[in-house]
Image: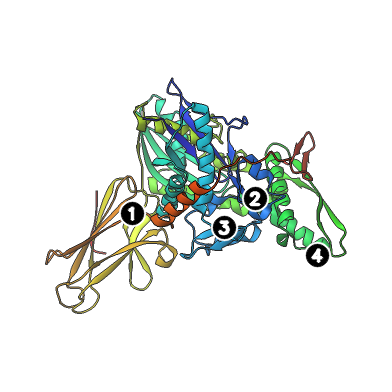
Amino acid sequence: MTRIIGIDLGTTNSCVAVLDDKQHPDTLVGADGERTTPSWVSWAASGQVTVGTRARRQAVTNPSATVYGVKRLIGRKVNAEDVAWFARLAPFRIVAAPNGDAWVRVHGQPISPQEVAAHILRRVKQVADESLGEPVTRCVVTVPAYFDDQQRQATRDAGMIAGLDVVRLLNEPTAAALAYGIHRHGGGRRLIGVFDLGGGTFDISIMSVDNGIFEVLATGGDSALGGEDWDRRLVERIVDEVFDQYRVDLTGIPMAMSRLREACETAKKALSTEPEAVIQLPFLANDGSGAPINFERTLTRDQVEGLTKDLMTRLEAPCQRALDDADLEPGELEEILLVGGMTRWPAVEKFVEKFFRKKPSKGVNPDEAVALGAAQYAGILAGESNDAALLDVTPHDIGIKVGDSQFAVVLPRNSMLPVRARRLFATTNENQKFVSIELYQGDSQDVSKNRKLGQVVLDDLTPGPAGSTRVELVITVDVESILSVTAREPKSGKEASVTIRPSGGLSQREIVEIINRRRQEASSQPAPEALSGGVRVTTREHSVHSLKPPTDDKK
């Protein structure tokens, strides 16, 4: 059996790690010396695909065919609010698939986020192959704890397209806790929180750790909140300033938007350690008379914090809800672990300290912690390590549609997996002959705002007055998020069952077609590219170049 590698498929960067001979997780380094791979993919007109740093360098020269932030699209609908704003500022096209999913259009061809993510996974697999000196096919891939079933399955599909056997999806906060080695601390049961704010998603998990057993007590988060939102605020502000001064709309100039987005991200990073930074963008665009726009702007950390105050506010509700679900007060948590690059932002760290009433721990590189934890768990699955066991929970409520638009919860969020729940429902019409039960996943009381999972139909019901016929609904979810549903009329014993496997938006036929097409494409290495120039961000001390009912029985 080959080794199982751990992969952090990130919004901004991806990383791969494995257990070494001493059972310690180790980040694998590519031939270029990079410990992380930028989650960027670029297509040349010839069809040649470039991934990682080389792809990112093409964002200025080939913006409409260079895709980033695909994790924010995977398993999402194109009409989702956060997808819509992403589409407004992204230099590449985001279009609707036939089923309404958000895809990208490159050189006139629609491409699913799963296929884009597969290119990134294939690249980190190559890093692992070269580092280990043998091909690897099995992996643990991390996902945000708040991902729903469709987003999780879409991630699995991306792994399949990349030629990987995804043996398990692991929640990113749990992976981070493993990387921190919390399970090796003595002293009995400990309550910890994992605060994970990355490039595109935010997760908060409350855990109990006792004798190597990780029990997730509650999760919360926002799958559309991350460091890219801070970048977006800067981009939007400068777009408005350029329009006010020159009457030029940069959003219609892909090359200008790519340069601006890169400069804003670099300025944000500089401001995490310095009080101010200068953005210089010569020849950003042309004004109405054809004269060049040479943009220069000094940004202070205070200004950025003012622009993003509402983003900071969005962090509080998921944290409070997770604590409420775990029936805990902030002071009862012994340790708060920081994960994700955006936790380097000083205001984020201050928020965590103020909300949880203690200084957070920063003992592991936030960019590599998730991959290291995935490698630790991969070793457990492979039998190389046995010092931890994980008990996970459902991230969202699961229930059914009642009435015209109401959502009745059958299986509450944060139910430990595997889990089974029962509910009794009654008919609403006289002599009702059948019931069609539609299942949804989500956290809104309005069923239209939740994700439909499937349905089960039970017919030939015993006739009688409205409310006289009862139907028992049993929902079971296993550790792989496979949902089994049985509807049964206790009086007659008739029942109907259905197994609902998560769908990532692509059919098996479509996945096979993508795999076959990839096999037919001629593989070639991209020629070395020159660094794109014309972008410079400076701080006062240094210079940095171009740089998301009746009964209830649960057991």
Q: Earlier in the sequence, mark 2 or mark 3?
A: 2
Residue 474 in sight: yes
Report the Cα–Cα distance between label 3 and label 1. Answer: 26 Å
Task: Name the residue tied to disc 1.
Answer: 501
What is the three-letter code of the residue carrying label 2? Ala
Give the residue number, with chain letter if any, for mark 3: 104
Q: Secondary structure at mark 2?
A: loop
Which numbered disc, 1 or 2, marks the residue that appears first in the sequence? 2
Image point (48%, 38%), residue name: 7
Tell me if 291 is positioned left or right of 422 in this view. right
Q: Nearer the viewer, mark 1 or mark 4?
A: 1
Specify the label residue 402 is tagged with: none
Give the amino acid type for the residue marked by disc 1 in the picture.
Arg
- Classify mark 3: residues with Cα within 10 Å, few (<14), some (14-19) or many (20+): many
Secondary element type, mark 3: strand
Q: Position of residue 118 (x, y in %)?
A: 50, 46
Residue pointed to by mark 2: 44
Q: CB under 8 Å between callouts 3 and 1?
A: no
Q: Earlier in the sequence, mark 4 or mark 2?
A: 2
Return the residue at label 4.
247
Label 4 to label 3, Cα distance in Å?
29 Å
Q: Residues within 10 Å of mark 4 (few under 14, many from 20)?
A: few
Instruction: Classify mark 1: residues with Cα within 10 Å, few (<14), some (14-19) or many (20+).
Output: some
Determine the CA span between mark 4 and mark 2.
Answer: 32 Å
The location of residue 203, given as percent across then percent down, is 49, 46
- The percent coordinates of residue 402 (x first, y second) are 32, 69
Disc 3 residue type (three-letter):
Val
Between discs 4 and 3, the one toward the N terminus: 3
Q: Pointers 1 and 2 in contact (CB under 8 A)?
A: no
